[in-house]
Amino acid sequence: MSGSESTMSGNQSLCTRFTFAAFSSLAELQPVLFLVFLILYLFTVGGNLIIICLVGLTPSLHTPMYFFLVNLSFLEVCYITSVVPLMLVHLLAETKTISVRGCAAQMYVFTILGLTECCLLAAMAYDRFVAICHPLHYTLRMGPRVCLKLAAASWTTGVMVESAQTTWIFTLPFCGTRKIQHFFCDIMPVVKLACVDTSQNEIVLFAVSVLFIMSPCFLILCSYMRILVTILRIPSAAGRRKAFSTCSSHLLVVSLFFGTALFTYLQPKTAHTPETDKATALMYTVVTPALNPVIYTLRNKDVKEAFQRVTQRNSLRQMA
């Protein structure tokens, strides 16, 4: 069926399918975009799976920091998979449609993973805070049970908050153009299709975004302020460099993720345009997940050494 399929309810035509605008204005470049995004997707999935396997195969990496990194890598694989495969199909297909239920499912997965990542990054910042500011109590404060509780709290927060928010969004009646000015079912482009006044909904959505994006961001900022003060008190330059190197990768990932998230979800409605929304969304759905494996491998001595040991071990086995 086409994107204009609908059912009648009273005097309104309520849609059962949406059509994506996607990258229709770049029709000639869509094969090139398909190739670029496919390479980035495979690189992201492969890089994060390598990190998960490296941590699992290397006993020296069985620490709280790498426990959270495995959670983050698994989340990134699911996060990019919730958006990019369908986007790749639509880059080659003439009809770019999705059912309302399919759109809801994509939004559920995407938003749950997005908020969970916010919380996981805050948990990782707390881990670095304890490691640098309270090294003698690190083992006690960051034991296995504490790590499991922090990870479980991150996932539970993501599931509960975003399930409620997405369910609320899809109680709205959708009609009119039925065309999503985006390449996936993001919150604001879908809300704009509702055929009722959504001003109150948008205020609540904005409040939820402020609370559940800014709260982890605030905790991260507090943690790094304390970390910075502690690092500056270290007398030797070598000691300061070593302490900073343990959290530089996480700080870079936080900057990329929260920078694009804050720009997208906390800007006024009048500032949203389809072009800027798509460009920003590409940053946090494709580019940032692709950079994370690079950041955590190239800037992490422990991961690089573990990778070398695993490859050398495999080479010796093949020679034998």
Image (tube, rainbow, N blue to C red):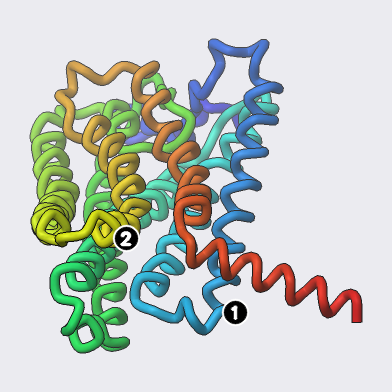
Q: What kind of residue is marked 1? A: Leu
- Can you say whether 255 is above or below 142 in the image? above
The residue under the point 67% across, 72% down is 310
In the rendered image, is residue 102 in sight?
no
The number of callouts visible is 2
Query: What residue is disc 2 on?
Result: 242
Residue 267, image x, y percentages: 17, 27
- Between residues 110 and 248, which one lies in front from this camera angle? 248
Label of residue 171 in the image = none
* Neighbours of disc 1 within 10 Å: few (<14), some (14-19), many (20+): some
Mark 2 / mark 1, whichever is N-terminal:
1
Callout 2–callout 1 Cβ contact below 8 Å: no
- Between residues 119 and 167, which one lies in front from this camera angle? 119
Label of residue 57 in the image = 1
- Can you say whether 203 is above or below 134 in the image? above
* Neighbours of disc 2 within 10 Å: few (<14), some (14-19), many (20+): few
Classify residue 125 by image quadrant.
Answer: bottom left
The residue under the point 62% across, 66% down is 307
Depth check, mark 2 against mark 1: the one in front is 2
Q: Is residue 94 left or right of residue 186?
A: right
Instruction: Give me the C-alpha separation between circle 2 and circle 1.
Output: 25 Å
In the rendered image, is residue 147 in sight?
yes
Q: Is residue 39 left or right of residue 138?
A: right
Residue 35, image x, y percentages: 69, 30
Residue 1, image x, y percentages: 61, 32
